[in-house]
Image (spheres, grey):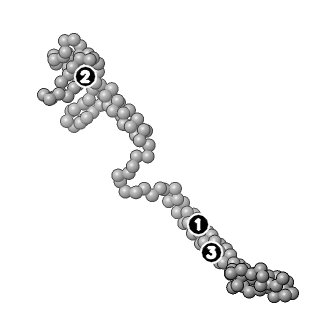
Amino acid sequence: MSTNEHMNEHDIEYGPTPAGAQHEHTDIDPSVGYKFAVWLVVAMLLSVAMVYGTFFFFERQQKAADVVAQTYPLSVGLPKLPPVPNLQNQPFKDIYQLRNAEAEKLSTYGWVDKDGGIARIPIDRAMEVMLQRGFPARADGGDSLNVVTQDSSSGRTIAPR
């Protein structure tokens, strides 16, 4: 049986295997493998150099920042805020504080304009004073819980529930 009997159209480009060959002659050329290994080592060394270079760069920046912090210790903890107006950091706390301040104004005595002689009184006391001075009030006590404000073609109306 000759080597030509087992050849097909794909084997023509490689040719027959020579007699006494210790390996297939279609294997990779060893010089290509060595070149690949050398370039792989070079790429790995470059990668390691870039990583360590970046590490030492940031380490130097941190050390410089530490020196500044030791020189000016009071400036370390101050946050750098953007210019106003700022977003609310805690909106629920803000609305809670606003409502507490409004409730305090409605329930306590205080000066609005001391030079002008204008003071504020608690809202309950203000309603009593208005009734004592004859301010008109609803005869039925103004049960506003049983009425609904509606929109109509003639404007706003109040209707019982």
Q: Is residue 10 above or below residue 135?
A: below
Seen as rendered, the residue at the extreme right is 20
Marks 2 & 3, CB-CB < 8 Å contact: no
In depth, the one of 52 and 83 nearer the eye is 52
Quarter holding residue 61: bottom right
From the image, state whether disc 2 or disc 1 is nearer to you.
Answer: 2
Answer with left or right where residue 84 lies relative to residue 16. left
**Residue visible at 55% across and 63% down in the picture:** 69
Asked whether the viewer can see residue 81, the reply is yes
Quadrant location of the N terminus in the rendered image: bottom right
Q: Which amino acid does label 2 sit on?
A: Val
Q: How crowded is mark 2: few (under 14 residues within 10 Å), some or many (20 or more)?
A: few
State the SS at label 1: helix
Comparing 39 with 98, the one in front is 39
Please identify, in this view, whether the residue under mark 3 or under mark 1 is nearer the observer.
3
> Mark 1 belongs to which amino acid?
Gln
Query: Gap between marks 2 and 1, in whole Å?
Result: 66 Å
How many other residues sit within 10 Å of disc 3, few (<14), some (14-19) or many (≥20)? Answer: few
Mark 2 / mark 1, whichever is N-terminal: 1
Image marks 3 and 1: residues in contact by CB distance under 8 Å: no
Q: Is mark 2 on a helix, strand or loop?
A: strand
For label 1, the residue is: 62
Residue 65 image position (x, y, % from top left): 56, 66
Task: Look at mark 2 in the image and give the residue it sits on.
Answer: 148
Q: Name the residue under label 3.
A: 50
At 38% from the left and 32% from the top, the residue drawn is 100
Of the two numbered discs 3 and 1 on the same chain, state the one appearing first in sequence. 3
Residue 5 vs 99, above or below: the answer is: below
